[in-house]
Image: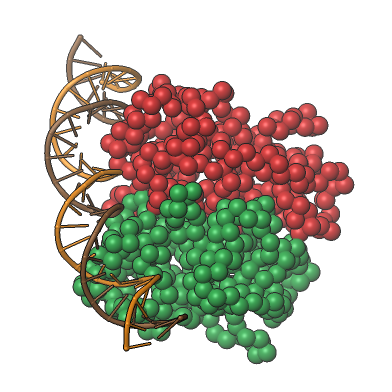
Chain colours: A green, B red, C orange, D brown
Amino acid sequence: MTRAPASRALDPTPLWLKLSSYLVLSDEEKMYLADLERTIAREPPRTDLLQQGERYRDVRIMREGWAIRHKALPDGRRQVVNFVLPGDIIGMYCTLFESADHSVTTLTPVEVASFPPERIGELFQSFPRLAAALAWSGAREEAIVAERLLSLGRRTALERTAHLLVELLRRLSVVNMVTDGHFVLPVTQEILADALGLSIVHINRTLRRLRDSGLIELNGQRITVNDVRQLASVGQFDELYLHLIRAPRRLERAFSGAHHHQNGHNGVRPDGEDRAKA
Amino acid sequence: MTRAPASRALDPTPLWLKLSSYLVLSDEEKMYLADLERTIAREPPRTDLLQQGERYRDVRIMREGWAIRHKALPDGRRQVVNFVLPGDIIGMYCTLFESADHSVTTLTPVEVASFPPERIGELFQSFPRLAAALAWSGAREEAIVAERLLSLGRRTALERTAHLLVELLRRLSVVNMVTDGHFVLPVTQEILADALGLSIVHINRTLRRLRDSGLIELNGQRITVNDVRQLASVGQFDELYLHLIRAPRRLERAFSGAHHHQNGHNGVRPDGEDRAKA
DNA sequence: TCGGCCGATTAACCTATGTTGTGGCCGCCT
DNA sequence: AGGCGGCCACAACATAGGTTAATCGGCCGA
């Protein structure tokens, strides 16, 4: 998606990749980002990185592996709000909220970085463009949740499932986790069910239908999407909501004259022609 | 909720009220807020304030009246993502996104203020505490959408409906639009259906059940909640997700040493003891 | 090697919710 | 006054999706 940049000392992390799809980062910004990801921990599957009702602690950056953000009802019913993929941030609103209204649980072994909430303030002061990119990432999360709401409210089981698969494909592409149409989907059918508001049995039926129609193939955790276009059409997928286009020109203005660390070289690239309608 | 402040020249607007429930605003901040709401327009019902796919223009503040934020599928199915109430902001991500992935349509005559996106940048630079309060408001929106997702995915029709009514009650309380248990619900059953992912007929059935059980009364657009506690229990309502508590102490730190306009007098009040579990 | 457990799969059956259709009320236009 | 359109109400019927239960295969620990 984005070409490897000038800085060769730094390894492009998933977050780095994701933000770069939104705006071009300066070396200085990249270094700050790398520094944010300095403190790294590994966790096994089924670990809670955050628990509903718990006080927020650090902000975390998912570097590797999958997790789910989910909410539960007192009687045990559960809804997966979103999948947390490499490059996603956990507990971004740490600074604003006292305690979490959702849990985050790992599905695979993960590698997460964490940093103290104070750094968010620091970041907004010193690196407004980076801050904007993070805000974009957060706002996009909301857009994804809203689109999932549309799915649960108004799409049939088949449509929802197709939609989710295309969404994951797109999101994983940005962080280079898709190779010609297939990717790893480290998810039980129970979790899919909880994400799509269906029963486990019905998800099974639905996946079968998708397999029978030849749109997808499943081998263990590996899923192959044979015909993205058609799958997208089944799911009425319009990627507008993913906001996969570069920062608007407005952004330049809004943060202009802003700051110290505002470097001279190439700022926002407001070319927004790479949005393809599925 | 919040006592009328020192400044007597200024009329507390709904946004003002809402933000004040999060943190105490200084006079200077209040004045800036008032200035943001200077340009006012009135619109009749059924007006689109924003349209799916459209380029973002100004940011708007709802001052009076109701609207809905909704998304539509190509074939006409529609999902109401959220209700826009007085004090809510429309198009907050204007600066970050090129075009809108949802529409906003008025339900009643409304009064909206609007200001150019550049002012967001200005605000973040000069009034970090105000910016944090707005960010809180935005983050809360996401939390509300996530909770609605839980409703659509895992709550029954009756539960969803009860939950929504309690939510509206709470949100309207903050902006003084509830008087002992009743408020105006300027919403057709069709819109309720679209908000809850139900058919119009089934919403009708469900409201009947709630009425028959004596939990609510409906006279025209006026709804009376007779027993909030019980209604909340039916809907498994836990207000944690509304984050109706004051800013955490963290916030102080995160934005500390920040800025010019940072005034001396009383900053954030981190007393978080007013959360009642429903 | 032998359970035992977890997840996938499928069949049979059930129910919450959707659909269709009718009628009634009310406000508004002419 | 009469007709029309929007909204509410409710009955009768249809179905997408839920529930229960049984089977199977793979993995792991004893």
B246, above or below B184, in the image: below
Indicate the quadrant containing the N terminus of chain B: top left, top right, bottom left or bottom right: top right
Which is nearer the eye, B71 or B166?
Answer: B166
**Is A61 displayed left or right of B3 in the figure?**
left
Residue at left 62%, top 46%? B243
Q: Position of residue A212 (x, y in %)?
A: 21, 73
Residue B114 vs A219, above or below: the answer is above
Location of residue A12 with respect to A274 vertically, above or below: below
Which residue is drawn at the image coordinates 44% and 56% (left, top)? A79
Tell me which corner region of the image, top left, top right, bottom left or bottom right, holds residue A136: bottom right
In this rendering, does residue A137 appear at all? no
Question: Left of B168 or right of it: where is B253?
Answer: right
Whole-percent x and y of residue A107?
A: 48, 71
In this rendering, would B258 be left or right of B190?
A: right
The answer, for residue A221, to whether it is visible in the render is yes
Residue at 58% across / 75% down in the picture?
A: A43
Q: Position of residue B21 (x, y in %)?
A: 68, 39
